[in-house]
Image: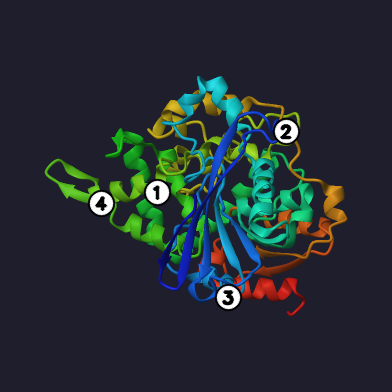
Amino acid sequence: MTVSYRQPGVVLTDRRFTVPLDHDRPAGETIELYAREVVASDKTHQDLPWLLYLQGGPGFGADRSVGRPGWLGRALKEYRVLLLDQRGTGHSTPANRQTLPLRGGPAEQADYLTHFRADAIVRDCEAIRAGLTGGKPWTVLGQSFGGFCVTSYLSLAPEGLATAVITGGLPALDAHADDVYRAAFPRIERKVAAHYARYPEDAERARRIADHLLHHDVVLPNGYRLTVEAFQSLGIALGTGDGTHRLHYLLENAFVRTPQGSTLSDAFQEQVQAMLSYARHPLYALVHESIYGQDDRPTAWSAERVRAEFPQFDAAKALAGDEPLLFTGESIHPWMFECDPALRPLRETAALLAARTDWTPLYDSARLAANTVPVVAAVYHDDMYVDTAHSLRTARTIRGMRTWITDEFEHDGIRAGGPRVLDRLLALVRGEA
């Protein structure tokens, strides 16, 4: 049963689909997928081509926008758009601390979560495409991890694609997670240096907060234990267009005077817990490193191990000298499963996933080299989340790929640039730019 309703300028339709948990066992267990169809209100009855949007992440449901903002407004000029909650997110059989115990213990949960990577998402898309498009291929737009999924799509089922558009999400085809993080930490250090150059006073503010956390046990209102490492992880914001400004505003009001002395303010703690909690997207933490697993090597908490190769990120050493405190970026660490109450019940499950060695390939270099699907990618100069050099090496592998390399936007350019970014990419892939 489908339900339709209206918002300003658009008609929305809720759609639900049943797909196999394991596509290699089509007669086995099934899960439910949810997607929201969006069409311009003046085009409701037109026979429009479909555009499937794959969200970044992993572990985030599709955008819950109102009306036709940003890139969506541009897409609705010529497409009927499908916003898919990828499996395990949003309304698509969500995977979290409340639902995963239905699978059993940590071992059963880890086995279950091996089916939540890009290859399974692509096969989900193919399972639902025929019923929506009448068998016609569709255009797919993938942001960040969504772009990883599009690259898998080009590898596994290119016949389902009319056009492929990737924004900030061209993955390394054969890099281990260790390679990804060895490239990431120097980029993060550059972003932190740029932040302190813009807001010099934040260097001392960050040191003061870190020193407070090294000497006090701080538990946020939601039960999150705020360690200095957790505070450093707020640097994930520095990879977005306005992230440096948001971090500055956070740091400038961190402390308040009380009868007992200076302490972290309630307002600061409230903002920090909203930024650090994985309650809304726990799958991101659980499967993040597994999106790089393709060989017989475990990911084995790659970011934690590789960080040790960069001692300048050690807060205690920085504070003992006169070095600036370095924030960290998009990385998942075992301590998160101790600090965050939304992840704490899943720490054994996460450890089992980190130890797995049976990951299957996600990309097919030979098939990508023979690609015939029109494909374009926005590659952001010095992207904090996805290594630019890795992306360009992949771009050279995919036959016929056109790239737009820009420093006008950060990783979230499809949101910040909206219609302009999508317009540029569609013109480029069609040979109009």
Provide residue 429's location: percent of width, then percent of height.
Answer: 74, 71
Given the image, on which type of amino acid does mark 3 rest? Answer: Lys
User: For residue 267, which numbered disc appears in the image?
Assistant: 4
Question: In the rendered view, would you say 151 is above or below 378?
Answer: above
Mark 2 vs mark 3, CA separation in Å: 38 Å
Given the image, on which type of amino acid does mark 1 rest? Answer: Met
* Sooner in the amino-acid sequence: mark 3 or mark 1: 3
**Secondary structure beneath label 4:** helix
The reply, left or right, for residue 430 in relation to residue 272 is right
Mark 1 vs mark 4, CA separation in Å: 13 Å
Provide residue 261's location: percent of width, then percent of height.
Answer: 17, 43
* Corner quadrant of residue 245: bottom left
Residue located beneath label 1 in the image:
275
Q: Residues within 10 Å of mark 4 (few under 14, many from 20)?
A: few
State the residue at coordinates (66%, 48%): 183
**Secondary structure beneath label 3:** loop
Q: Are marks 2 and 3 in contact (CB under 8 Å)?
A: no
State the residue at coordinates (63%, 43%): 181
Q: Are marks 3 and 1 in contact (CB under 8 Å)?
A: no
In this rendered view, identify the residue nearer to me: 379 or 67.
Answer: 67
